[in-house]
Amino acid sequence: MLIIFIMDALLQQQIEAVLFWKQEPMSLQDICSFLSLDNKEKVKKSIGALRKKYNEDTTSGIRLISDEQTYALVTDNCISEKIALSEEKNKDKELSKAALETLAIILYRGPVTTSVSKDYF
């Protein structure tokens, strides 16, 4: 019984980490493929436990949202206005010298790979 609990907790931890890392909605199939798992029902159950953890805890600034096909970790509404203002401010930042040089190479040569761009620096 303890082993099953630990395995379930590990699966929840892995799903949570993948959704946090991805920073965009993922389908059940994408999550299963990434974690090399075939048992979609077990993954669904773990996602349900995560949803309960995040959405019932009113002290958490994170929520797990889903539509009929995808799942994503997002910030709670309590901070969304501040995040939106911060994003708006960051939109107007100037590009770094390295970013401008990379764009110049792309404009001159067309699409390039990372290894080709490293040859210029």
Image (cartoon, rainbow, N blue to C red):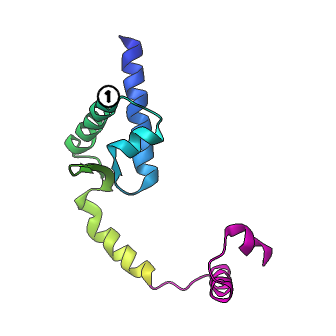
Prevalent SS, magenta region: helix
Residue furthest toward the top?
A: 1
Which residue sits at x=37%, y=79%? Answer: 88
Check the image and report above or below for 72 versus 4: below
- Three-letter amino acid code of the residue under disc 1: Lys
* Number of marks in the rendered image: 1
Which residue sits at x=23%, y=60%? Answer: 77
Q: Residue 33: which quarter of the image?
A: top left
Specify whether 58 is left or right of 85.
left
Q: Does 83 appear in magenta?
A: no
Tell me which segment is drawn in magenta: 92-121
| Rendered location of residue 86, percent (x, y) | 38, 74
Q: Does 117 appear in magenta?
A: yes
| Rendered location of residue 65, percent (x, y) | 25, 50
Q: Which residue has dot 1 on it?
A: 42
Q: How crowded is mark 1: few (under 14 residues within 10 Å), some or many (20 or more)?
A: some
Which residue sits at x=38%, y=13%? Answer: 2
| Rendered location of residue 112, percent (x, y) | 66, 75
Q: What element carries label 1?
A: helix
